[in-house]
Amino acid sequence: MSRIVERAYTVRIGVCPGSFDPVTNGHVDIFERASKLVDKLIVVIAENPNKKYLFTLEERAELIRQSVSHIPNVEVDFGSGLLNDYVKSRDSHIIIRGLRALSDFEYEFQRALFSKYLDDDIETVFIMTNNKYAFVSSTGIRELAKFGGKLEGLVPTVVKEALENKFNTLQKK
């Protein structure tokens, strides 16, 4: 006689935080790979009041939405305050961080330890970037765009166009 065991299905929700000013192909690569590890991936745009952003929160959200439209289980949201509080509010316990270099790891490892200190149930998962994006950062992209550098292959087309429009508008002022 066989015995049937019932199990409650738990949805695995991952939270991938960042400022994404702007989103790059390196970010999109991380989102694509992370989306395969969870049932739902929430890309949360964090606002740091000490930073000056090129794009507004709404612009960044729209650029991300368009850049990940091919990934069905990705949602874009906004967050402020403690990341752990946001993660818990979304019924998650998984933070996903992309890493480019050893310096990223040192910084993110310290953040992960703080997160673990605040809530032992929250896990941080690190995903290494694809080698072809290891040198790409949002800061570098903004600088490259400001001076008319080649953006092809580094950012989604929609982001390239938004950067070109933004800097053309700024130059006209």
Image (cartoon, rainbow, N blue to C red):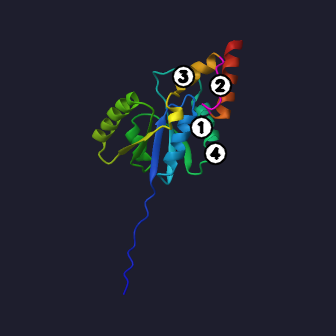
Callout 1 touching callout 4 (CB < 8 Å): no
Q: Earlier in the sequence, mark 1 or mark 4?
A: 1
Q: Earlier in the sequence, mark 3 or mark 1?
A: 1
Q: Earlier in the sequence, mark 2 or mark 3?
A: 3
| Residue that lies at the very extreme toward the front in this rendered image | 131
Residue under pointer 1: 64
Image location of residue 66, percent across then percent down: 65, 40
| Figure quadrant of residue 128 | top left
Whole-Å distance between the Cαs marked 2 and 4? 19 Å
Q: Residue drawn at (63%, 47%), measured in percent from left and top?
A: 70
Compare residues 66 and 102 and report the one nearer the observer: 102
Whole-Å distance between the Cαs marked 2 and 3? 12 Å
What amino acid type is highlighted by mark number 4? Ser
In this image, 80 relative to 112: left or right?
A: right
Q: Residues within 10 Å of mark 3 (few under 14, many from 20)?
A: few
Q: Residue drawn at (30%, 40%), measured in percent from left and top?
A: 118
Residue 18 to residue 11: above or below: above
Q: Earlier in the sequence, mark 2 or mark 4?
A: 4
In this image, 102 relative to 153: left or right?
A: left
Query: On residue 163, which mark appears?
Result: 2
Query: On residue 69, which mark appears?
Result: 4
Helix, strand or loop at label 4? It is: loop
Whole-Å distance between the Cαs marked 3 and 1? 18 Å
Query: On residue 164, which mark appears?
Result: none
Image location of residue 145, percent across then percent down: 63, 21
What stretch of residues is rendered in magenta?
A: 148-155
Residue under pointer 3: 140
Q: Is the C terminus in the top left, top right, bottom left or bottom right quadrant?
A: top right
| Figure quadrant of residue 152 | top right
What amino acid type is highlighted by mark number 1? Ile
